Amino acid sequence: MSEQFSITQDYQKCLTAESVRAFLEENAKVRLADWQKAAAEQNGYAEYLLGCCYDYGVGVKQNAVTAFEYYLKAANKTIPPAQNAAGYCLLNGIGTLPDARAAANLFFKAAHHGNKNAQFNLGWCYDSGCGVEQDSCGAVEWYLKAAEQNDCDAQYNLALHYE
């Protein structure tokens, strides 16, 4: 099995795991060196996995700045969960200065790739006018897309628009 294939498998398993933290805790001890090597070779999946490790402090010392840097590298390679994670960091000023417009832009990119968390976050941006012009119709559109993927928070926020 090639290293590239193995990293891709790790990424896919991380996405389908019940908990990202649980996946990392189970796998980082054995796979961290491989992820670091692949990230050094600009592998976006490995960059995302390392971002998660630094975000949660699994296998490495927790570091929000380093987590954001890895998320952003992976986001620039069109890795939707990384785009969402980097957007969340930008929105909340975690590991970087806050930038709501850049956050909304990253949520938009990930949302268009079907990432339900980004769809919810983009809906919230439209709902609150954070990083984009406030637009209830835009909020409903993105909440609905996330709700169709069983995002409970999106279902709740969508229901609020129909009260």
Image: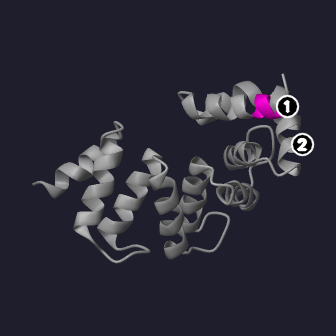
Q: Position of residue 14 (x, y in %)?
A: 63, 32
Closer-to-camera residue (146/20): 146
Farthest top residue? 1
Asked if the stretch drawn in magenta spans residue 6, the answer is yes
Q: What range is drawn magenta here?
A: 3-7
Residue type at the position of mark 1: Glu
Q: Can you tell which quarter of the image residue 75 is in?
A: bottom right
Q: Is residue 130 left or right of residue 41?
A: left
Mark 2 or 1, nearer chain start: 1
- Main SS of residues in magenta: helix
Res. 153 visible in picture: no
Q: Give the side of residue 101 with respect to residue 35, left or right.
A: left
Image quadrant holding the C terminus, namely bottom left
Q: Is 32 one of the magenta-colored residues?
A: no
Mark 2: secondary structure: helix
Res. 27 visible in picture? yes
User: Which residue is at 28% across, 57% downward?
Assistant: 141
Give above or below for 30 relative to 97: above
Q: In this figure, what is the number of numbered marks?
A: 2
Residue 3, labelled with which disc?
1
Residue contact at pointers 2 and 1, CB within 8 angstroms: yes
Residue 79 position in % (x across, y down) = 63, 50
Write down the residue under mark 2.
37
Badge 1 crowding class, 10 Å Cα cut-off, few under 14, some 14 to 19, many 20 or more, is few
Considering the image in quadrants, where does the N terminus appear? top right
**Looking at the image, which residue sits at the far left?**
163
- Determine which quarter of the picture holds residue 150: top left
- The three-letter code of the residue at mark 2 reads Lys
* Residue 143 screen position, x and y as percent: 31, 52
**In this picture, is 141 found above or below 148?**
below
Spot occupied by residue 15 in the image (x, y as percentages of width and height): 58, 34
Mark 2 to mark 1 CA distance (whole Å): 10 Å
